[in-house]
């Protein structure tokens, strides 16, 4: 299985309209190449989407039993069942999907592994009726966006509070379509953004993430195979240094549904 760092919760998947697709792999014999995160020699299912129901979890209209699933956070901070919440974006590898037993029931499957992760984390600024910014990056708040934390309504969020945002990043305009926003009054230990990296200067160790200038040290923070316009997830020191945010980790992101 490919390392979970290659998270598939956003990016080109959403743009191609297949973020909610389920790839069924049933008994394809042969070569063992990875397809949608599963060996082509295996039997099972793969899906990526938001959690729309709990009690097991419901993703893309399928109820996944998660009792024995391996739970992991996409930023390698560990994970457990109690952290799976409505509106979170997850990727699931599991068993073959069993059709619904009745017209009112749901298809079912057993989840073998579940990976979850937010895309952006940082301070709120430039609030409007349906958007706000995090470090210059725009969050689109939808009627379906779930708000949780110290407030549970979008209209109660204030500039200067801190949020963690789950959702789908549009590589065309750089906005995130928020599926879940967790609100706090406490500054987190690190900020987080994701998007296309441009104007990479390996000598000066600088680049742009959307409109946000970043730098890093040491060299190893930037993966050696990073290229212009690659989609990356970046963890940032929460203290601005001379007008630039310092990256403490840069992860290349990709989608096995597309790549």
Image (spheres, rainbow, N blue to C red):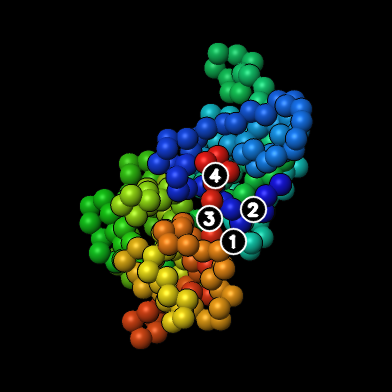
- Residue under numbered circle 1: 75
Asked if residue 127 can be seen in this view, the reply is yes
Q: Which numbered disc flags the more N-terminal residue, 3 or 4? A: 3
- Crowding at dot 4, Cα within 10 Å, few <14 / some 14-19 / many 20+, comes out as few
* Mark in front: 4 vs 2: 4
Asked if the residue under mark 2 is in contact with the one under mark 1, i.e. CB atoms within 8 Å, the reply is no
- Residue under numbered circle 4: 259
* Mark in front: 1 vs 3: 3
- Residue under numbered circle 2: 4
Q: Secondary structure at mark 3?
A: loop
Q: Give the residue at x 57% y 68%.
A: 224
Residue 70 image position (x, y, % from top left):
72, 48
Residue at the limit of the structure toward the top, as seen here: 103
- Crowding at dot 2, Cα within 10 Å, few <14 / some 14-19 / many 20+, comes out as some
Number of marks: 4
* Mark in front: 1 vs 2: 2
The foreground one among 158 and 110 is: 110
- Crowding at dot 1, Cα within 10 Å, few <14 / some 14-19 / many 20+, comes out as many
Alpha carbon separation for disc pair 1 and 2: 9 Å
Alpha carbon separation for disc pair 3 and 2: 10 Å
Q: Which numbered disc flags the more N-terminal residue, 1 or 3? A: 1
The foreground one among 27 and 131 is: 27
- Residue under numbered circle 3: 253
- Crowding at dot 3, Cα within 10 Å, few <14 / some 14-19 / many 20+, comes out as many
């Amino acid at each position: 299985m490919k390392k979970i760092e290659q998270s598939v919760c956003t990016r080109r998947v959403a743009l191609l309209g297949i973020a909610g697709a389920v790839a069924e792999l049933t008994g394809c014999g042969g070569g063992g190449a990875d397809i949608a995160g599963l060996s082509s020699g295996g039997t099972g299912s793969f899906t990526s989407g938001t959690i729309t129901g709990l009690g097991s979890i419901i993703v893309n209209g399928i109820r996944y039993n998660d009792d024995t699933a391996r739970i992991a956070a996409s930023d390698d901070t560990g994970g457990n069942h109690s952290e799976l919440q409505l509106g979170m974006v997850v990727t699931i590898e599991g068993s073959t999907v069993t059709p619904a037993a009745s017209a009112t029931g749901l298809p079912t499957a057993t989840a073998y592994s579940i990976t979850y992760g937010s895309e952006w984390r940082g301070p709120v600024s430039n609030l409007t009726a349906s958007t706000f910014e995090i470090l210059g990056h725009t969050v689109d708040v939808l009627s379906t966006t779930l708000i949780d934390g110290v407030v549970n309504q979008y209209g109660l969020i204030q500039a200067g509070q801190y949020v963690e945002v789950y959702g789908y990043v549009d590589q065309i305009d750089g906005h995130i379509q928020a599926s879940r926003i967790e609100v706090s009054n406490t500054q987190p230990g690190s900020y987080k953004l994701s998007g296309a990296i441009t104007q990479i200067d390996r000598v000066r160790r600088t680049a742009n993430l959307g409109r946000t200038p970043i730098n890093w040290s040491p060299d190893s923070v930037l993966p050696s195979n990073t290229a212009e316009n690659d989609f990356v997830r970046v963890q940032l020191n929460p203290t601005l240094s001379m007008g630039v945010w310092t990256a403490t980790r840069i992860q290349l992101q990709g989608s096995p549904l597309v790549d």
